[in-house]
Image: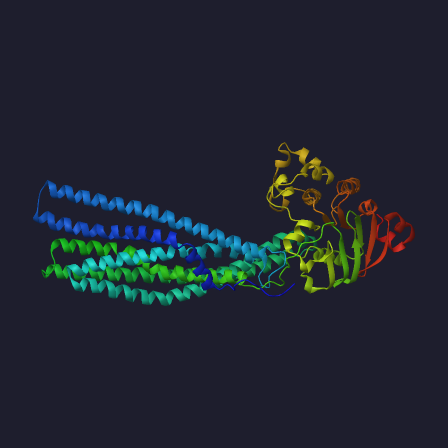
């Protein structure tokens, strides 16, 4: 395996540009429609001013009819353009957010970890909240342009009435944006820090949920909760800081917008009093002064949302730009299903060497749990091949030469703590919905009693992490999932530690029968599984120290007998 990443490095700016480029068409259509909406909104007070001006001069039913028709056209345009414009933009927004969520999640779920100092809870926050906030740029830019259209139309209309009114709007808008741009930078930095602290708090919660039972076991839950409270308090204080900055920003924007609207109204009143503009133009100016508050508010809020989107994009870049620890190969394993561990030194493993031929059922009796966990991690490619000495070969090829997809298609390592998902028994056994041996897997894992216990059978609901199942039921459900996958090579780590001896004996026989002709490796100290295996390898102090059948080892090896006899 190599250590280079062929993909183009991601930055926050690159992510935002990619989002904008992918949605150019939707943004163009949304901008036109939202610009039409803002133009229609601006046209309303202008139309009122013109109606008043002409009504005073040309009184009659025809003038009134044309005025009502004009207002109806404007109102219809405003309603339809807003409805369809926001529909286009929000669809593009949610689609883009989905794309980034999938991309971040795919990086986080890669079997070969990426070199990024983030916990799974933090990656989850980035894949949800930050992806959504980054995609908001799809709506921000069209709304920013449409608000600018409204301000420009209002400035031109007022300028036609009197140049000073138009200049006041333009100069005032520029001054407002200059002031708010300074505050928006503070919002961006504060929001980035808040998102980081919230993500850390989320990661701490995830750790607590996973380790809650062990913590209760030795009384460490109170200390863990205190640690979470500290992290959560930091997130709360930062959220208050962000709220203060947002409040200051919103208050300043509202005050400046009100000052500008008031200045336009007063100037228009003075010009009308001085006879420089007519009554209709005064009505238009006052109406525009009131109307302009809304686009100015929207226009002035856009820098804040741009900074938030940029902060979120930079957090996504932490995951997307992180180089992989290793890059998988592209080769395919030779058919057959044999697996070989050749001189592997990693963790508790010391030049470990053994081979399992295709179709064999081999049990590995580990005297030390650490060695069992390290061996399972190496075989599952959770440890990059260049992180340990020696080699692991699948179908005659080293794991480092194989693509991850090829390894996953032929080799499945089911850990002792297999995850249980919210859903049903069926979706946990067959997540992809393509399994053909579900019934056999349920029977072999002795999960039949759980299925029969519920009227829904395999469609019985399972809560997150299997909260409504016992420890033994969760373990058998995980085993059923591994057996239903029906891979050429199956590695099981302590699959029966939470079941009684009678059930364990039945499961051992069922596994041997169901996996006949397929390569199976069981890392275990269970006498039932050891007895069902074709041969047993004894793993002690990181190396294979003995090899024979379970019964021969019981008769000849005192250490083995003490380690596995129950």
Tell me the quarter of the picture where residue 307 sits: bottom left
Foreground of the two, 207 or 536 = 536
**248 is higher (above) or lower (below) than 466:** below
Colour mapping used in the image: rainbow
Query: At which x and y percent is residue 438?
Result: 67, 38
420 relative position to 182: left or right? right
Q: In this view, does 296 lie above or below 465?
A: below
Residue 270 quadrant: bottom left
Query: Looking at the image, which residue is at 45% across and 59% down?
Result: 18
The answer to whether residue 100 of the structure is visible from this angle is yes
**Closer to the camera in the image, 388 or 294:** 388
Q: Position of residue 75 (x, y in %)?
A: 25, 45
> Number of marks in the image?
0
Residue farthest to the top, as pictured: 455
- Indicate the quadrant containing the N terminus: top left, top right, bottom left or bottom right: bottom right
Looking at the image, residue 218 sits to the left or right of residue 305; the answer is: right
Q: Position of residue 494 (x, y in %)?
A: 75, 49
Can residue 128 be seen in the rendering of this structure? no
Residue 357: where, in percent of width, then height? 79, 51
Q: Residue at x 73, y 53 (%)?
A: 395
Q: Is residue 59 left or right of residue 491?
A: left
């Amino acid at each position: 395996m190599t250590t280079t990443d062929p993909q183009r490095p991601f930055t926050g700016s690159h992510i935002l540009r990619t989002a904008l480029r992918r949605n150019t068409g939707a943004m163009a259509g949304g901008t036109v429609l939202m610009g039409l909406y803002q133009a229609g909104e601006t046209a309303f007070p202008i139309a009122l001013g013109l109606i008043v001006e002409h009504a005073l001069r040309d009184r009659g039913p025809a003038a009134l009819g044309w005025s009502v028709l004009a207002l109806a056209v404007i109102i219809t345009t405003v309603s339809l353009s807003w409805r369809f414009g926001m529909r286009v933009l929000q669809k593009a927004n949610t689609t883009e957010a989905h794309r980034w969520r999938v991309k971040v999640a795919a990086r986080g779920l890669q079997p070969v970890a990426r070199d990024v100092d983030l916990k799974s809870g933090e990656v989850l926050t980035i894949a949800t909240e930050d992806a959504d906030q980054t995609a908001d740029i799809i709506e921000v830019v069209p709304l920013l342009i449409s608000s600018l259209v409204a301000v420009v139309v209002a400035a031109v209309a007022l300028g036609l009435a009197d140049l000073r009114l138009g200049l006041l709007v333009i100069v005032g808008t520029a001054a407002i944006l200059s002031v708010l741009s300074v505050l928006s930078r503070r919002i961006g930095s504060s929001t980035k820090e808040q998102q980081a602290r919230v993500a850390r708090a989320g990661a701490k919660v995830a750790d607590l949920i996973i380790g809650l039972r062990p913590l209760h076991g030795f009384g460490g839950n109170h200390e863990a909760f205190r640690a979470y409270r500290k992290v959560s308090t930091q997130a709360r204080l930062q959220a208050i800081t962000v709220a203060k900055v947002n409040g200051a920003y919103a208050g300043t924007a509202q005050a400046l917008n009100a000052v500008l609207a008031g200045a336009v109204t007063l100037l228009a009143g003075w010009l009308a009093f001085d006879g420089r503009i007519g009554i209709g133009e005064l009505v238009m100016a006052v109406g525009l002064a009131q109307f302009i508050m809304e686009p100015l508010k929207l226009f002035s809020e856009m820098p804040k949302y741009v900074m938030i989107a940029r902060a979120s994009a930079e957090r996504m870049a932490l995951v997307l730009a992180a180089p992989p620890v290793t890059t998988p190969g592209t080769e395919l394993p030779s058919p057959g299903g044999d697996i070989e561990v050749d001189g592997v030194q990693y963790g508790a493993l010391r030049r470990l060497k053994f081979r399992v031929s295709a179709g064999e059922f081999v049990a590995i009796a580990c005297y030390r749990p650490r060695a069992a966990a390290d061996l399972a991690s190496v075989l599952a490619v959770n440890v990059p091949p260049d992180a340990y000495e020696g080699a692991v070969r699948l179908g005659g090829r080293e794991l480092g030469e194989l693509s991850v997809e090829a390894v996953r298609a032929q080799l499945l390592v089911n850990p002792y703590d297999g995850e249980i998902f919210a859903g049903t028994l069926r979706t946990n056994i067959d997540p992809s919905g393509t399994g053909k041996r579900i019934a056999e897997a349920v029977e072999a894992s002795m999960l039949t009693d759980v299925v029969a216990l519920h009227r829904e059978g395999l469609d019985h609901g399972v809560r997150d992490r299997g909260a409504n199942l016992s420890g033994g039921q969760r373990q058998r459900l995980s085993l059923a999932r591994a057996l239903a996958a029906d891979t050429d090579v199956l590695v099981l780590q302590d699959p029966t530690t939470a079941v009684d001896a009678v059930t364990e004996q039945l499961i051992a026989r069922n596994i041997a029968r169901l996996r006949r002709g397929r390569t199976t490796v069981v890392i275990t100290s269970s006498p039932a599984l050891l007895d069902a295996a074709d041969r047993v390898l004894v793993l002690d102090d990181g190396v294979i120290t003995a090899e024979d059948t379970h019964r021969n080892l019981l008769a000849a090896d005192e250490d083995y007998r003490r380690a596995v006899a129950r």
